[in-house]
Structures are given as structure tokens and as C-alpha cells.
Amino acid sequence: MTEQAKKRPEFRNINVFKDLPTYRLPPAGVLSIMHRVSGMIMFFLLPFIIWMFDKSLSSEISYGDFTSVFHGSWGWLAKLVCLALIWSYLHHFCAGVRHLLMDVNHHMVTKEFGKSSALACFAISLVLTVILGAKLFGLF
């Protein structure tokens, strides 16, 4: 390689404010990070999931209490928490199926398939989230 050839930048100390905003992850990298984020959301909202499950199955009175939360003054917040759970579950599920497919079929582990399958996972999970979110907020 000659001196005139373009050298790749060498990062020894990455500046959070200068270098990270200009760094662009590929879609598969973003999907991987969002897979972890969705898992953390489901983990931290586990007490809310257990509360919803308990209230919905204990008795008719507790089920009435459960449904009244979504129609009360703080109903929008409960619906937003449920929407976060819906998105995190659907995203985590789609990304997990993608990872399982790539584990089973080793010929799928290519840069092109990684990009296309990551974009497909984003699209599928977002479309399903919008549909279920519309149902949750009473649009149909």
C-alpha cells in the first residue's frame, strides 16, 4: 500500500460527543441492541405483567378493577405501558426467531441476509404493534 492510499481512521480513545453521533450501525447491529432493550423492558415490567395476570384471573370483581384502570384518569398511562409491553414482546419474538433461523441455517449468515432480515424484523414488529396498539386504544 502506498502512502497516497487512503488510510482507515484509527480510534484509540473514542470521544462520546464527537465520534459516537457520526458512527452508523448496520441494521443488524441496531436490531441486536433493540433486542436487548426489549428484553430489559419486559424484565422491568414483569411486576406489572404479574399484576395484570392476577387481576384478570382472580375473580369477576378483580377483573372489573383491572379493566377500570384502563378507563380511569390514568388509563392513557396504563395503555402506554401495555403498548411498550406489546412492542417489546413482538420485537423480542421476531428478533429471536431471526436468531434461531440463523443458528439453524448457517448459510443464512451473510451480510445481505443480516441486513434484509433485520429490516424485515423491524417492519413486522412495528406493523403488528401498530395493529395491536390501535385495538388497545379503541380505534377498531
Image (spheres, rainbow, N blue to C red):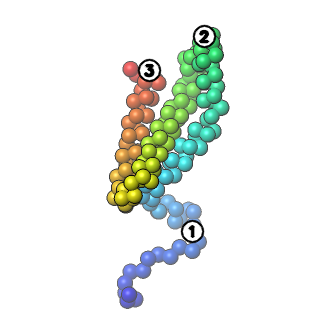
**Of the image marks 3 and 1, the number of the one nearer the N terminus:** 1
| Kind of residue at badge 2 | Glu
Dividing the picture into quadrants, the one containing residue 44 is: top right
Residue 20 relative to residue 57: left or right: left
Marks 3 and 2, how far apart in space?
22 Å
Check disc 3 and report the residue beneath it: 138
For the point 45% across and 50% down, the residue is 99
Number of other residues with Cα within 10 Å of mark 1, as a class: few under 14, some 14 to 19, many 20 or more: few
Secondary structure of residue under mark 3 = loop
| Kind of residue at badge 1 | Ile
Secondary structure of residue under mark 1 = loop
Residue 93 against residue 13 in the figure, above or below: above
Check disc 1 and report the residue beneath it: 14
Check disc 2 and report the residue beneath it: 60
- Looking at the image, the residue that sits furthest to the front is 104
Residue 84 relative to residue 103: left or right: right
Q: Are the two marked residues, 3 and 2, in contact with CB atoms closer than 8 angstroms?
A: no
Residue 62 against residue 87 in the figure, above or below: above
